[in-house]
Amino acid sequence: MVFGALLFSPLADVVGRRAVLIGALAVISATMFASGFTTSVEQLAPLRFVTGLGIGTMFAPVNSMAAEYASNK
């Protein structure tokens, strides 16, 4: 997850938060779905790694969006 946050979160500043969130969610969904069809740890490990990259990618944009919409009070 740390690698995803460090590598792909700055992309949100370039292409926009919404596009990054949708892309990360698509990656997370696809790899979690594919994980259900694995038959060995060797197949599962890379899928879980990519899932972690997707989750890490979502951390910064989600926190930024929450801060934007939070009340100043």
Image (tube, rainbow, N blue to C red):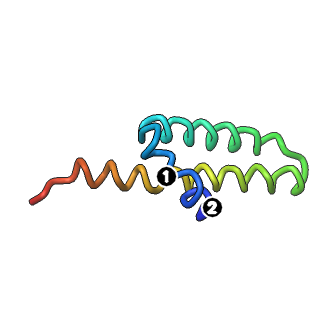
Whichever of callouts 2 and 1 sits on the residue coming sooner in the sequence is 2
In x, y percent, where is residue 68?
25, 50
The residue carrying mark 2 is 3
The residue beneath circle 1 is 10
Choose between 40 and 17: the one closer to the eye.
17
Residue 54 point in image, percent of width and height: 60, 49
Q: What SS does tag 2 mark?
A: helix
- Residue depicted at 72% across the width and 56% down the height: 49
Q: Residue 2 bears which disc, if any?
A: none
The answer to which image quadrant residue 7 occupies is bottom right
Dot 1 surroundings within 10 Å: few (below 14), some, or many (20 or more)?
A: some
Separation (CA) of disc 2 from disc 1: 12 Å
Looking at the rendered image, the disc whose residue lies closer to the viewer, 2 or 1, is 1
Determine whether 70 is above or below 31 in the image.
Answer: below
Residue positioned 76% across, 49% down in the render? 47
Few, some or many residues within 10 Å of mark 2 (<14, 14–19, 20+): some
